[in-house]
Image (cartoon, grey):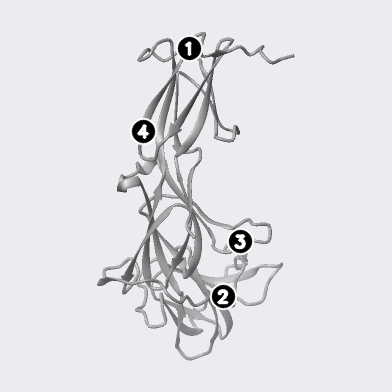
């Protein structure tokens, strides 16, 4: 279940992110990637010495990658890494690498591990090189994810105030999820292996957060738009209605349960808040002023706190 209103638009792509006919369909089954896994990209050992392990006199191996088992070869954006399968000091020695689309390597006869990465998607395959030229293909089982968010009624959110984080779809035993990509900009395309991902959309920097579980399907671009129920609020302490904001004011924001969720200092306190009831406390010099207010989704507003004796709270009261 999504927290908030989530609208998914799944766009079929013949070849992800490239010029191909577009149609619409719902995501269905997702195949797992290869069970063969390499350590992290940084966990490999570069060859020692001046002689490369990729020799011109060895067998020629042509490597290509596809998004799906029936897809076309990916022509750009692939990072190829070829490893010896025996670890050295706990790391796999990297024999060769290449960037682009289909790649050709000259390797000594033997067994190797090949890893292809495409954005955040990747696949690994064990290959055997002989004296004769041969070809190997890797199916990435990958798709793309494009994220955006709006306010109630479809009102666009300024991109600079909106960020997404993508997590593993399955939570660990303690409830935490592994973070895959932080601070994803809206409407940018992220390449991922097919599967379900937990996406967190943050509007502003306080509590306007929407969480969604989104499925990425191989060979397709998934466009997901979430709806935030929030508004931009600006608060100021004034001596009279419509008056100038009083400088050097300390602000504390409490939620409906009385828990503090934001503190700031300045003549104005501007922030994005999820819809709900709040209490704002303004402190200036030795006086404290308080006001309750309600945030309505999509309705930006300015909150004035009057610096009057009637509104002030004596900080010494209740000290007994």
Q: Which mark is residue 300?
A: 4
Q: Quadrant of residue 304?
A: top left
Q: In this view of the protein, which residue sits in the foreground, 92 or 197?
A: 197
Q: Residue at x 66, y 76 (%)?
A: 86
What residue is disc 3 on? 171
Check the image and name the residue furthest to the right.
Answer: 320
Instruction: Nearest to the eye among marks 2 and 3: give it.
Output: 3
User: Is residue 118 in view?
Assistant: no
Q: Residues within 10 Å of mark 2 (few under 14, many from 20)?
A: some
What residue is disc 2 on? 53
Q: Using the numbered discs, state the Cα–Cα distance from disc 1 to disc 3 in whole angstroms.
A: 48 Å
Q: Using the numbered discs, state the Cα–Cα distance from disc 2 to disc 3 in whole angstroms.
A: 41 Å
Q: Residue at x 61, y 11 (%)?
A: 314
Q: Residues within 10 Å of mark 3 (few under 14, many from 20)?
A: few
Q: Using the numbered discs, state the Cα–Cα distance from disc 4 to disc 1 in whole angstroms.
A: 23 Å
- x then y, percent, for residue 254: 56, 30
Q: In this view of the protein, which residue sits in the foreground, 78 or 295?
A: 295
Q: Are marks 4 and 2 in contact (CB under 8 Å)?
A: no
Pick whichever of labels 1 and 3 is earlier in the sequence. Answer: 3
Pick whichever of labels 4 and 3 is earlier in the sequence. Answer: 3
What residue is disc 1 on? 307
Q: Are marks 4 and 3 in contact (CB under 8 Å)?
A: no
């Amino acid at each position: 279940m999504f927290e908030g209103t989530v609208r998914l638009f799944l766009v079929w792509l013949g070849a992800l992110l490239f010029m191909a006919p577009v149609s619409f369909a719902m995501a269905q089954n997702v195949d797992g990637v290869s069970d063969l896994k390499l350590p992290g990209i940084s966990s490999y050992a570069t060859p020692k010495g001046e002689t490369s392990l990729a020799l011109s006199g060895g067998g020629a191996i042509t490597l290509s990658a596809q998004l799906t088992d029936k897809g076309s070869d990916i022509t750009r954006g692939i990072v190829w890494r070829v490893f010896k399968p025996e670890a050295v000091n706990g790391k796999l020695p990297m024999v060769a690498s290449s960037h682009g689309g289909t790649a050709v390597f000259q390797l000594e006869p033997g067994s190797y591990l090949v890893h292809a990465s495409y954005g955040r998607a990747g696949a690994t395959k064990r290959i055997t090189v002989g004296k004769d030229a041969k070809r190997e293909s890797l199916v990435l089982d990958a798709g793309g994810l494009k994220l955006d968010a709006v306010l109630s009624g479809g009102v666009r959110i300024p991109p600079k105030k909106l960020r997404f984080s993508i997590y593993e779809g399955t939570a660990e035993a303690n409830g935490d999820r592994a973070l895959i990509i932080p601070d994803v900009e809206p409407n940018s395309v992220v390449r991922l292996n097919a599967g379900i991902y937990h996406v967190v959309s943050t509007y502003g920097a306080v509590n306007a957060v929407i969480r969604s579980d989104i499925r990425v399907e191989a060979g397709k671009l998934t466009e997901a738009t979430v709806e935030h129920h929030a508004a931009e609020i600006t608060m100021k302490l004034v001596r009279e209605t419509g008056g100038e904001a009083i400088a050097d004011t300390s602000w504390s924001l409490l939620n409906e349960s009385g828990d503090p969720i934001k503190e700031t200092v300045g003549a104005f306190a501007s922030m994005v808040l999820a819809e709900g009831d709040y209490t704002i406390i303004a402190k200036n010099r030795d006086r404290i002023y308080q006001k309750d207010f309600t945030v309505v989704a999509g309705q930006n507003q300015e909150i004035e706190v009057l610096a009057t004796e009637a509104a002030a709270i004596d900080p010494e009261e209740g000290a007994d």
